[in-house]
Amino acid sequence: ASDFATLYGVVSKDFKINNKDALMSLGIGTGGFRSKNDIDTQQNDPNLFGGVGVKLTPRLSFASSWNGSTLASGFGISPFNFPLSVSAGITDITDVMGKGMQYSINLGYSFSF
């Protein structure tokens, strides 16, 4: 989260890696996408961010992202035949923020209306 206004633009592209579906996104933004230096100096200059995800099997995917200051990676799992998903990963892998790696586990359910 950021107290600074977040403005951003993103382009995304579907592609294949060894016959596996993948998606790559690249963007530029302010606020929540600031560099560590801008966070430390209270600046709000535009910065690059991006990510890539790969569908490894029909129920397992891997993704990694750079939010402008930290690197994160994790796996997504859809273990059942209904729209429940679990993702687990590590954020700030390179310890840019000085708090060590953080772990993330998320549970999601999607529905249409």
Image: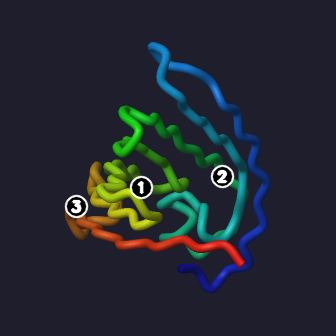
Of the image marks 3 and 1, the number of the one nearer the N terminus: 1
- Front position in the image: 40 or 56: 56
Looking at this view, name the residue that lies furthest to the left.
100
Residue identified by numbered label 3: 101
Q: Residue at x 42, y 55 (%)?
A: 70
Q: Amino acid at mark 2?
A: Asn
Residue 57 vertical placement versus 47 (above, below)? above
- Image position of 14 (left or right of 82): right
* Badge 2: residue crowd in 10 Å (few <14, some 14–19, many ≥20): some
Q: Point out residue 20 in the picture as x, y percentages from the top left corner.
A: 47, 23
- Callout 3 secondary element: loop
Q: Amino acid at mark 1?
A: Thr
Looking at this view, name the residue that lies furthest to the bottom.
3
Residue identified by numbered label 1: 70
- Callout 1 secondary element: loop
- Callout 2 secondary element: strand
Residue 26 vertical placement versus 41 (above, below)? above
* Badge 1: residue crowd in 10 Å (few <14, some 14–19, many ≥20): many
Q: Point out residue 37 in the picture as x, y percentages from the top left corner.
A: 51, 60
Which numbered marker is on residue 47? 2
Residue 91 appears in view = no
Q: Residue at x 47, y 56 (%)?
A: 69
Of the image marks 3 and 2, the number of the one nearer the N terminus: 2
Q: Amino acid at mark 3?
A: Met
Residue 65 appears in view = yes
In the rendered image, which quarter is residue 15 located in? top right
